Image (cartoon, grey):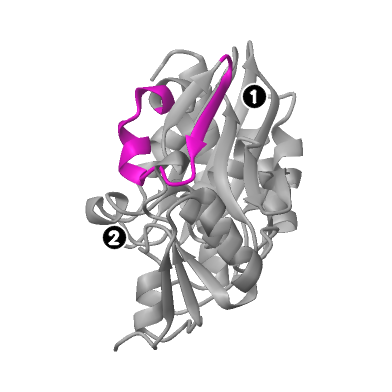
């Protein structure tokens, strides 16, 4: 199919883009990498009156580290993030997860901020942002504000981003002493959206999980923290009884949907498998076994 007709503006600066959104935000959609928006237009799942193309705004690119804070520009391509030594060294969860995002052709065009702004419940990066307690910097003509990733996602494709706002940058604390990350997803084919995925960020002291976050994706309308499962792990180690209790507690955290790809029961079973895999992998990494 062909996209419906729409007006098109190519922003020449951040201020230009924000001025347009201030005037037409309710009618506009922002075009960054376009790897989700263009297919949605062509399938007529969306029909916005106006597209605001921000692809030329180099001021929104770049990956830097300042002290113990990593900053990723909203227009950093997935490939830029995947190849970044800063990300590999200081945000290993993102480095691991982004290799699972779609296919190389998609990663060559898709943007970091675009993935976060879309909030696809089966996408990897929103869950990682929540697990890492990332800070999402947004701008409008009214000024700038910071939204914690845990407060950014409200429901199915529903975020705290206002119609006149753009994500400009994401801040993530560099991984600290004792912290380890783990990531795993299960999909029918490499590059497909995950049936179930898990992003974990955990602090290990000796043989104890002291702090951390377990965030599932593909199991609901938004990234889903597994708080009850974490309570079974916190202050303990990955002995079989602990993992069993954590898997059982997942029924209080997750209420996965069923669809033509997998039933609700299948998704819950897969989530329990991933929980054990990721926790054991984090423990092995902390012990220097991987």
Foreground pick, 289 / 154: 154
Q: Is residue 53 left or right of residue 166?
A: left
Foreground pick, 112 / 156: 112
Q: Is residue 123 left or right of residue 98?
A: right
In x, y percent, where is residue 195? 45, 62
Disc sitting over residue 189 in the figure? 2
The secondary structure type at the circle numbered 2 is: loop
- Identify residue for label 1: 237
Vertical position of residue 70 compared to residue 207: above or below: below
* Quadrant showing the N terminus: bottom left
Foreground pick, 132 / 39: 39
Vertical position of residue 54 compared to residue 257: above or below: above
Residue 95, visible in the rendered structure: yes
Residue 218, visible in the rendered structure: no
Vertical position of residue 271 compared to residue 65: above or below: below
Q: Is residue 8 left or right of residue 270?
A: left
Ranked by sequence position, the earlier of labels 1 and 2 is 2
Foreground pick, 39 / 236: 39
Q: Is residue 178 left or right of residue 100?
A: right
Disc number lying in front (1 or 2): 2
Q: Which residues are magenta?
A: 67-87
| Residue in view at x 64 percent, y 24 percent | 237
Q: Is 50 inside the magenta-drawn segment?
A: no
Count of numbered circles on the image: 2
Vertical position of residue 220 compared to residue 95: above or below: below
In x, y percent, where is residue 98? 39, 43
In x, y percent, where is residue 47? 48, 84
Quarter assignment of residue 204: top right
């Amino acid at each position: 199919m062909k996209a419906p007709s729409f007006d098109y503006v190519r922003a020449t600066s951040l201020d230009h883009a924000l001025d347009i959104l201030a005037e037409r935000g309710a009618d506009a959609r922002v075009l960054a990498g376009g790897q989700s928006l263009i297919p949605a237009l062509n399938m007529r799942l969306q029909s916005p009156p106006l597209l605001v193309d921000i692809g030329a705004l180099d001021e929104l690119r770049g990956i830097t580290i300042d002290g113990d804070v990593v900053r990723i520009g909203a227009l950093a391509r997935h490939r830029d993030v995947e190849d970044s030594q800063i990300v590999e060294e200081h945000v290993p969860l993102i480095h691991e997860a982004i290799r699972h995002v779609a296919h190389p052709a998609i990663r060559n065009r898709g943007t970091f901020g675009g993935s976060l702004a879309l909030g696809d419940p089966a996408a990897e990066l929103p869950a990682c942002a929540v697990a890492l307690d990332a800070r999402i910097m947004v701008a409008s003509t009214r000024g700038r504000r910071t939204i914690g990733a845990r407060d950014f996602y409200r429901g199915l494709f529903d975020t705290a981003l206002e119609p006149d706002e753009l994500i400009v940058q994401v801040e993530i604390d560099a991984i600290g002493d004792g912290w380890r990350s783990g990531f795993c997803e299960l999909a029918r084919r490499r590059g497909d959206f995950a049936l179930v995925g898990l992003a974990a960020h955990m602090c290990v002291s000796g043989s104890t999980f002291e702090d951390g976050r377990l965030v599932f994706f593909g199991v609901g309308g938004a990234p889903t923290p597994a708080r009850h499962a974490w309570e079974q792990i916190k202050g303990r180690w990955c002995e079989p009884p602990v993992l069993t209790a954590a898997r059982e507690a997942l029924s209080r955290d997750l209420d996965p949907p069923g669809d033509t790809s997998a039933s609700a029961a299948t998704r819950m079973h897969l989530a329990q498998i991933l929980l054990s895999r990721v926790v054991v992998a984090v423990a092995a990494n902390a012990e220097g076994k991987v």
